[in-house]
Amino acid sequence: MTKQLGGFIARNGAVIILAIATVSLATCYAVFSPPAESGPPIVPASKFAAPRLAPVDPATQARDLQRGAAAVSVKRLRDAMHDPESFVLEDAIFTAEGAGCFDYRAKNGFGALRKGHALMTPARQIHNSDQGDAFVALWNKHCAGRTGEPMTAFVKRFVL
């Protein structure tokens, strides 16, 4: 009987190995595959259309950039104060030329509450009233007597 079994294996060895491999793979798949979900069929991502974005209006984009610059400028100004927690923004406008003009109150090194002015030039440089005559010249050039878009509420809401 052993000779007959040996002869059978010799003749059909490849088939037996293939059968064992198939059973092993089927067992692994059954054990390690995730459970089947009974939800809707999976739709390939290629079937979805990309969302169409509305074109950006250049005026709106410029206004958004000004608002962002105002917020960053006020934050940098507040952080530079002797006592940043005492900083109170009273007024902020952006002129049509792109300058930011700010009026604020903050405590100085002696603890006294003082009023101050600051501006951000169209080149995004920040100057404040502690800089003396150089600041006065810049304030007169960019802010004095000018009107612009009020930014106080926006800056207070998002920065302070």
Image (tube, rainbow, N blue to C red):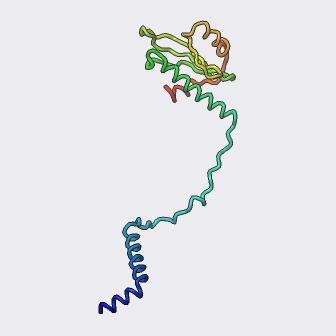
Identified at 48% across, 21% down, the residue is 79
Furthest-top residue in view? 133
Identified at 34% across, 88% down, the residue is 6
Q: Where is residue 155 drawn, in percent x and y?
A: 54, 26
Identified at 62% across, 53% down, the residue is 50
Q: In this view, does 18 lie above or below 135?
A: below
Question: Horizontally, is 65 left or right of 14 in the view?
Answer: right
Quadrant location, the N terminus: bottom left
Question: Horizontally, is 8 left or right of 142 in the view?
Answer: left
Question: Horizontally, is 28 left or right of 92 in the view?
Answer: left
Seen from the viewer's position, the closer of residues 122 and 89 is 122
Seen from the viewer's position, the closer of residues 121 and 27 is 27
Q: Quadrant of residue 22?
A: bottom left
Q: Is residue 48 above or below residue 31?
A: above
Seen from the viewer's position, the closer of residues 43 and 124 is 124
Q: Where is residue 2 drawn, in percent x and y?
A: 30, 90
How many numbered badges does the structure rendering display? 0
Q: Where is residue 16 drawn, in percent x and y?
A: 40, 82
Q: Is residue 43 above or below residue 89?
A: below
Furthest-left residue in view? 1
Q: Where is residue 56 drawn, in percent x and y?
A: 67, 39
Seen from the viewer's position, the closer of residues 17 and 50 is 17
Q: Is residue 16 above or below residue 159?
A: below
